[in-house]
Image: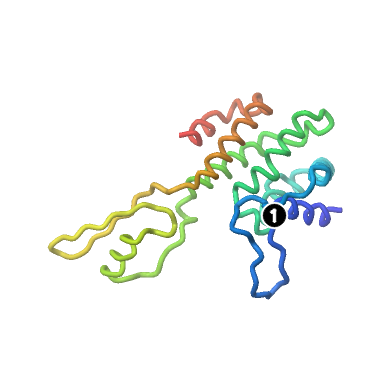
Amino acid sequence: FQSTTQLCLRIIAGDPFHEEGSSIATHTSTVLHPAPPPAVFCNAVLRMTTILMQALGQASFSLEMVSGAEGLGAAADRIEAVLCHLLIPLFLRTSTNPREASVIHGKDLSFCLSLMQHAISPPIGKHSTAPTTTSTTLATTFIRGDITGRQGSVSVTDRGHSATVSTLRIVRDSVSQCIYLALKVMMLCFGKLLTPMWPKVARLVK
């Protein structure tokens, strides 16, 4: 039942299934599922998810596990898919169904806030490090633009090239929109649970 639920979660999140070792990537260029399953199927999957979360508890089937790679596969890397296809519908469902009201705990909301914060401002340890290059190559790289989304500048002095990288990241509009929508839903559905987490919410909004 648990493995079936995880498979269904990947379907509604748009995980690109392919055979192990295959050279083709069947993923679309969109960050959200281009053809989501019918609402009846999605509601059934969410119901299965809440049943398992209640039955197995935080140790075996937590929200963190459900929304991670173990639960959503490759779709877990797309915050838009995680929020719009799983977390937001799950928040709305549990907050309006008394039998499922106990599914979401304070630690789950704290995890979601951290997930959204890391999506727009990843921890320093998460940044990919590029191999060492010469000053000329480094200057050319920053002139063309940093593929990680950070902004940089290059200056030429009497000692040669110097490059600086700021910590300001370019965040996709879709990421910002999904995060703001998720915050609104969380405030509407879990106002009391969010009370001790307002500093996190404020930091995320900034």
Query: Toward the viewer: 27 or 83?
Result: 27
Q: Is residue 155 left or right of residue 43?
A: left
Q: Is residue 149 left or right of residue 78?
A: left
Q: Residue at x 76, y 48 (%)?
A: 61
Q: Name the residue located 60 percent from the left edge and 46 percent from the top edge.
A: 80
Indicate the position of residue 201 as horizontal and vertical percent values: 54, 32
Quadrant of res 109: top right
Circle 1 sits on which residue?
A: 14
**Residue 74 or residue 35, whichever sits in front:** 35
Q: Residue furthest left?
A: 158
The answer to whether residue 56 shows anywhere in this view is no
* Relative image position of residue 135 (x, y in whole percent): 26, 68
The C terminus is located in which quarter? Answer: top left
User: Position of 139 compared to 71: left or right?
Assistant: left
- Mark 1 is surrounded, within 10 Å at the Cα level, by few (under 14), some (14 to 19) or many (20 or more) other residues, namely many
Q: Which residue is pictured at 42% across the width and 48% down the height?
A: 169
Residue type, mark 1 in image: Gly
